[in-house]
Amino acid sequence: MASTDRVRLLDTNLELTRHLAPDERTELGTVTLTVVDVPRGQLQFEALLQQHNAFAATVLDGMLVHALQIGEHPGVQLLGPGDLLVQSNSSPPSWLDSVEFRAPAPVQVALLGEEFLAVARRAPHVIPALYECLADQMQRLNSQLVICQLPRVDERVLAILWLLAESWGHVTPGGIRLPIALTHETLGALVGARRPTVTLALRKLSESGAIVRQDSGWLLLEAPPGPAGAAKELAPELAVITLSRWTAEPEALDPAVRYAGLRDTVRELREQHLYDRQQTREQLNRIRTTRVRISAARERIAQDALRRRRPPSS
């Protein structure tokens, strides 16, 4: 791993300027970070930080895999441009067989060291922004944990592709393009499923027109299903408070006051009903538009496949 160049801190994918004052933004504009080319294979992250006297790194180009394994069951987290790599001070649990960073292909990372700490003293608002970058990663990881609990593997695969597209996807006229070529084994480790099951799930999603396989990734045409109903209450409920002889009797409300409250409630319900009806109409229109777009995409794909199979005319 060789240090080949330097990059301006503001030219990385880190979102660090959201809370900065103008003078702090100017300070950040003068800071450069060491760029290191990471070859394919396992990344000795702790040794890399020690070699360059750094405390963290951020991905500039390419993807890294943070891999964990318990017995024969692997799990991975993908880290791409804009993500942070931080070395943990605590040892992993003894029952984890392996914890490592791995580069499926050559990757470029930028190192955060003394240069970053120096500018943080002059522009302290960069520290909350750095914490927000880590919080965004944690939010994506939390979403991945929830996706792994979906009952059907095809739902998990579709949801994880859309989750990755939220960070690294591109909007195109044909759909959302996710330029990450993931193996079926990696997808299985992301969603907690075996490779053969993931293969069947991808085939089902492709046949239904939800996704289209491309050379450099996937084209997402159909979003995962939204919530079917109201979210369940996760907070524990309070015990029911019963009246006792030490409880004061509730004051009787005037009938006019009760009527006014009932009238306001009916008006609010009517307004909510009109709003819900409008939202339902808009959602139905979106569904119709999506179906037309998916049908057109299927027809284009079928025509392209037919043209490729048709022999040239003599």
Image: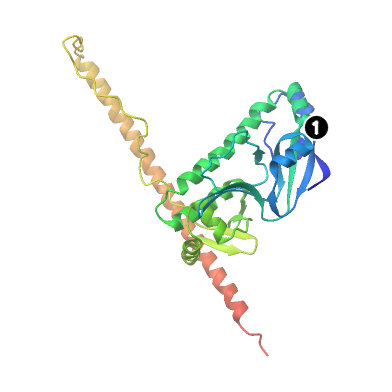
Q: State whether residue 52 appears in this view.
A: yes
User: Does 1 appear above or below 56?
Assistant: below
User: Does 73 appear above or below 92?
Assistant: below
Quarter of the image where one finds residue 6: top right
Front residue of 265/228: it is: 228
Quarter of the image where one finds residue 47: top right
Estimate the x, y position of residue 108 in percent, counting from the top left. Answer: 74, 47
Residue in the picture at 74% in, 53% down = 39
Q: Quadrant of the C terminus?
A: bottom right
Residue in the picture at 19% in, 9% down = 246
Front residue of 139/172: it is: 139
Estimate the x, y position of residue 247 in percent, counting from the top left. Answer: 20, 11
| Residue reaching furthest to the right | 5
Type of residue at label 1?
Answer: Val
Q: State whether residue 174 appears in this view.
A: no
Estimate the x, y position of residue 124 in percent, counting from the top left. Answer: 70, 23
Q: Is residue 263 left or right of residue 230?
A: left
Residue under circle 1?
A: 31
